[in-house]
Amino acid sequence: MGAFLHTFFSPFDFLRATPQIWDGFKLNLKLMFVAEALVLPLALLVAVVRGLPGRATAPLRAAAIAYTDIFRGTPLVLVLFIVLGFATLNYVGLSSETLFTNGLIALVLVYTAYVTEVYRAGIESVHPSQRMAARSLGLSYLQALRYVVLPQAIRRVVPPLLNDFIGLQKDTALVTIIGLVEATAQANQYASDWANFTGLTVAAVFFIILTIPFARFTDHIIKQREQRERAQAV
Amino acid sequence: MSTNGHFVSLRGVTKQFGDLEVLHGIDFDVGEHQVVCLIGASGSGKSTLLRCINLLEQVDAGTIVVDGQTITGTKVDVNRLRQKIGIVFQSYNLFPHMTVLQNVTLAPRKALGISRSQAEGHARALLRQIGLEDKADEFPDRLSGGQQQRVAIVRALATGPKLMLLDEITSALDPQLIGEVLELVRELAESGMTMIVATHEMGFAREVASKVCFLDAGVIREEGPAEQIFSAPREDRTREFLARVLEGGRL
């Protein structure tokens, strides 16, 4: 027991590892925020394309469906390796910037596929009579979508969007496998340098500290909505 | 265009949903400033007929002419057409994420391109007319059913339509709220608005209708002045329908 505590929870190593892990964690932070900033608009675009009406847009719809099927079904680890594989075809050496871009691309590809489905569920949850009312006032398809359907849809899917964002935060750790030196990699480095795993605990603490506020915020929003809907039902 | 001075003309309009034929060769005319009431049992095709007139539904056969324009052909600008035709639904269909004022100004601003201040001024004037100006900044959920439906009527009027389609607009309301909505429709009729009104309110139809059409299984079984339809129906089916409604205590 003493050996276990010493290996994973040594206060001395905790303090000594923290600056090094924090150095790596900054990369996780950058990855997650840049990725999320790309995922949210891209996924909305794919979801909208998937819902387009008419025969002329059938190829676009098919492309959107193929995309979500492929990238929701492929493990992120594989996508990371595949994207890296593509990169090595073009570059002689891989700079850390290139690695960052590759990690970012893989995360965005996979998470956009997930988030597309979240948006789509939201769009479909808006009753067709809302769209019909908007169209009957003379608004175009896109105007009805923009002013009537999407505002209601997005409001409804904020909790699942936050949930996927938490997933994305944690999955930034996976880019370590293509050689990006983020928090997990630094923790491993610390472990091999000092024969002590406390660095892993430090990295875990960083991730937990980051996700807890988001989790509570999600709970808060869900609760608020429930209360509002209950008030309406009375 | 041989519309014989009619504002709305339907000839041989047929509409199917899968194997179900909902409208079966409808011929139907509405003159300018007329109020035509459609009566008939649920499922007789009243709503579908209204939705065909503003192209929320595509007809399978037949022609519809509105204000001299054949709307059943190709190359019809549906958005322009719908700005000329207001429709109000049984379930109000107000936009719950927008205030009353935003609901009323959305189409004038985005579809007609009217400036915000101008659209809001017009909307407030309309709301004042129906006594709901103080609700302009409320969300629809905080209004009573009757108030919501009156806002829906004002929303449809805000684009300046020449024709109003009312689809059983009092059917979802508590009896004590029906009056305020019908009063507004009565005022609209008196102002000369051309209207096609699907309704179960026979007393109201009798009072405001220039003409009453009895729809039965997708055909217009009988049409004529309200007095004649309600007092001396010629068709057996009309008589049966009215007798049933009378038993329900709605005449």
Image (cartoon, rainbow, N blue to C red):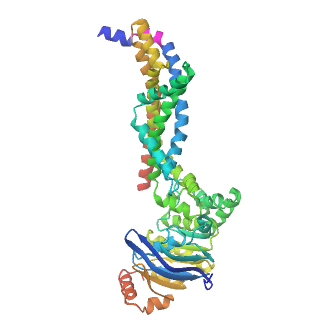
Residue at 45 percent of width and 38 percent of height: A218
Total numbered labels placed on residues in the image: 0
Say which of A220 and A55 sits in front: A55
Q: Considering depth in this image, is A136 or B145 the residue closer to the camera?
A: A136
Taking the image as shown, residue B216 lies to the left or right of residue A39, namely left
Q: Is the magenta stretch mostly helix, strand or loop?
A: helix
Residue A155 in view here = yes
Q: Which percent across, then down, holds residue A206?
A: 46, 22
- Furthest residue in direction left, as rendered: A1
Residue B33: where, in percent of width, then height?
Answer: 61, 81
* Extent of the magenta region: A10-17
**What residue is rendered at 44% in x and 30% in y?**
A79
Magenta span includes B174? no
**B117 to A178, vertically: above or below:** below
Q: Which residue is drawn at 60% across and 61% down?
A: B104
- The image shows residue A30 at horizontal and vertical percentages of 54, 26
Of residues B169 and B58, which is closer to you in this image? B58
Query: Would residue B129 be found to the left or right of residue B55 on screen?
Result: right
Q: Is residue B59 above or below residue A111?
A: below
> Residue B98, can we see it?
no
Q: Looking at the rendering, in which quadrant would you find the N terminus of chain A?
A: top left
Give the percent coordinates (x, y) of residue A158: 48, 42
Outermost residue toward the top?
Answer: A194
Residue B117, compared with residue A74, is above or below; it is below
Picture residue at 43% right of the left edge, 69% below the top: B174
Q: Quadrant of residue A234?
A: bottom left
In the rendered structure, the answer to whether residue A68 lies left or right of residue A151 reads left
